[in-house]
Amino acid sequence: MSDPREITRILFENFQPQAIYLFYAFGYAAIAVFLYGVYTQIRKYRRGQPDPSWGGLWSRFVDMAKTMLTHRTLKRRDRAAGSAHGMIFFGFVLLFIGTSTITLEYDILKPLTGVTFWYGNFYLWFSLVLDLAGLGVVAGLIYMMYRRKWLKLPKLDYTRPDRQPGDPDFDRSGYRREDWAFLWSFILIGITGFILEAARLVWLSDRPTVWDYRMWSPVGATLAHAMQGLGLTPEGASAMRGALWWFHGLLALTFIACIPYTKIKHIFTASASLMFRDPLAGRRLPKVPEEQESAGFKQITDLTWKQLLHLDACTKCGRCHEACPANAVGAPLSPRDVILSLREFANKALNAKELPEAAELDIHGKGVGQVFMETLWSCRTCLACVEICPVAVEHVPIIVQMRRKLVEDGDMEPILQKTLQNIHKSGNSFGESKRKRAAWTKELPFEIKDARKEPVDMVWFVGDYASFDPRNQKVSQAFARMLHNAGMDFGLLFEGEMNAGNDVRRVGEEGLYELLASSNIGTLQSCDFKTIVTTDPHSYNTIRNEYPDFGGQFEIQHYTSVVKQMIEDGRLKLKKKLDYRVTFHDPCHLGRYNKGFDAPREVLKMLGCELVEMGRNRDNSFCCGAGGGRIWIPDPVGVEKPSQNRMKEAGAIEGLQVFVVSCPKDLTMFEDALKTSGFEGKFVVRELIELIDECIEYEVWEEAGSEAA
Ligand code: SF4
Ligand code: SF4
C-alpha cells in the first residue's frame, strides 16, 4: 500500500528555479493586464449615469445564481446550445475551483503554515472530477464549433439589416473572427491539458504512486495508453511534457489576461447583467428626471452604468435578432445590432483616458457605432428581444430613450407628428371630439353609469380604438352587454377619459405622456370605485405598471380575467358550446408584458373551442406590428408586414376557422392582414368577446332589454 502523501500531482518537478521564477513572472504579468482591463471597464461604466438598481442586492444575487445554476434562460428555445454552454460553464467553474485549490495549497497554506491536503483520496477524487470537467468543456466547445460551422443558423449570421454590402460594418466579420479565436484558444487549453496529463503519466509510468492510480484521470489515462501504443517512451514523454507545459501554461495565462478585453468578459458582465435586471424593463419606462434639461439619450454618456454593462453582456447569441418582428419582415432593425453598435461606440469613446468632445459622443447618425433614425422607428416595442435575452439585456428602454431625443428634435414621420398633435388637442389618436368618446353607447338599450358622477364597483377604461374605431365599437357594445347582463356594477369616464398614453410613451413623447397620465389619474382619483377593467392591453399595461410612478395606484384587470371569473361564478351563463377550430394570438401587452397567457385560453376552453396553438405562442408570440406607435406609421408598400407574416403562420393550421384576438389594435391589424395576405374566406379574425357573446345566456339582458323598451 502506497503512502497516501505520495499519491499527488507533481507540479514543478525537473524545473530549474529560473524557469519557475519565469512562470510566476508571466503569471503576475497576466494578472496585472487583467486587473488593468477590469479598471478600464469599471471606469467606462462610471462614465454612465446613475441607475437605481442597487436595492435588494442579496435577493438579486440569489436570483442571478439560480438563473446561472439552472441555465434556465440559456436553454429556452435552444436546448442544445443551452446544454452545451452548461457543460462549458460548469466545467470551467470546476477547473477554476480546482486550480485555485492548488494555488491555495501550494502558494499559501504550505509555505505559511505547512498544511497540505492535496494528496491521497482527496487528490484522487479531485483528479477524477477535474478530468470529467475538462471533458465537459471540450465536448461543449466542439458542439459550439459544429453549430457555427455546419448548422449555419441565421441567428449567428452577423450580417446587418441596417447596412448595405460595401459598408465596412456590414457583415461584422471581426466578431466572427473573435468567436473562433475564443473557441479555438479555449479548446486548445483543454486539449493540451489532457495531452499534458497523458505525457506525465507515460513519463512516470514506472512510478506506482502515479501509474497505479492513472484511471482516476480517465481521459489522460486513455490518451496515455494510446500514446504508448504509438511508441512514446518515458524519455520522449518527458521532453514532450516540458514543451507542452509551457505552451499550455502560457496559453492559459494569455486567456486570463485577455478576459476584460474580449468576448471572454461575458463570464462577468453576463452575471452582473442578470443580477441587475429590472423585472419591469420596458413595461415601466423611466421618467425624465426633473433636473434633466432635455429628454432622452443623445450621447453615449446618457446611458446609465447599468445599460453600459448590458452592452458588454451581449454574447451575440442572436436570440433577440431571431425573435424581432421588425427584423423578420426586413426592416432595418436588429436589436442585437443596436446593442453591438452602442457597445462599439462605448468602447471607442469611453475607454480612452480622457472623454472626447461632446460631438464625438453623439450616438445618433450613420457613422460606425451610431444608430440610424430608421432603425429606431422600426421598433414595435413588442419586448420579444428583452424577454428572450438570456443575459437580461434590456433593449427597449434604450431604444425608447433614443426615440425621446428624436421626438424632441422633431425627427419623425409627419403622420406620426400629426397623430401626436391630435392626441394633444383632443385626447385621442383619432382626432375626434372628446364628447364623442362614448358615442358608441348610444346604440345600447340601457344606460351605462358615469363613474365620475356616481359610485361604481368597476370603472371600464375603454381606450381609443375600442371607443372610436367602428369595427371595435361593435366589440365594445358586446362587452357592455356582457357586463350588464352579468349584473356588474360598472361605469365609464366618458369624455373624462383620455388616451392612456402607453404608445405615446413608447413613441418617446414623454411630455405628452405625462399630461395624459396626469389627466387620467386625476379623473380616476375623483371617482368612487373598486377596480378598473379594460379591453385594451396597452392601456392595461401603462395603468398597471406606469401610473404608480405618477401617483396613480389602481387595481386593474384585463377583461379576459374578468370574463373568466364571471363564467366561473355563474354570472355569465353559456347558452351553447362552440365547436370552432381556433388559434389564439397573444397580444404583446397582455402576454409578454403582463403574463396574461392563461385566462383567454381558459375562456376558449369554456366556450368549447378546439384551440390549436401557432408555433409562436405565449411568451414567443409574434407582434402584430402595431406597438410602439407603429399603428400610426404606415409600413412601407410592397414589403411584408408583421401582421401578414402572422397570418401565414395561422394559415398553415389545417382546418382553422377562427383567428382569435383580445386587443382592439390586433383586430384592426389582423382583419386588414387577412385580406392582404390572401386568407379571406379561409378563416376569420374575431375578438374573443365576440365568441363569448355568441354563447351567452341573456336572461338578465332580456329583462333589462324589455325594461329599456
Ligand atoms: S421590441 Fe420588438 S420590434 Fe423592438 S427591437 Fe425588440 S423585438 Fe424588435
Ligand atoms: S442582446 Fe441578448 S439575445 Fe440579443 S444577441 Fe445579445 S445576448 Fe443574445
Image (cartoon, rainbow, N blue to C red):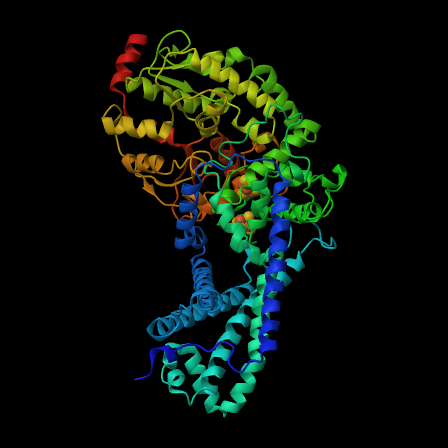
Q: Nearer the viewer, residue 607 or 328?
A: 328
Q: Which residue is pictured at 39% across the width and 85% down the height?
A: 211
The answer to whether any part of residue 384 appears in the image is yes
Q: State the quadrant of the N terminus.
A: bottom left
Where in the figure is residue 609, as x and y percent of width and height? 31, 39
Where in the figure is residue 611, as x and y percent of width and height? 34, 42
Q: Which residue is pictured at 51% across the width and 80% down the height?
A: 13
Q: Which residue is pictured at 44% across the width and 77% down the height?
A: 9
Q: Is residue 415 above or below residue 270?
A: above
Where in the figure is residue 622, as x and y percent of width and height? 48, 43
User: In this view, which residue lies farthest toward the left?
Assistant: 570
Q: Which residue is pictured at 45% across the width and 56% down the height?
A: 78
- 551 sits left or right of 561 in the view: right
Q: Nearer the viewer, residue 221 or 173?
A: 221
User: In this view, which residue lies farthest toward the front?
Assistant: 113
Quadrant in the picture for residue 442: top left
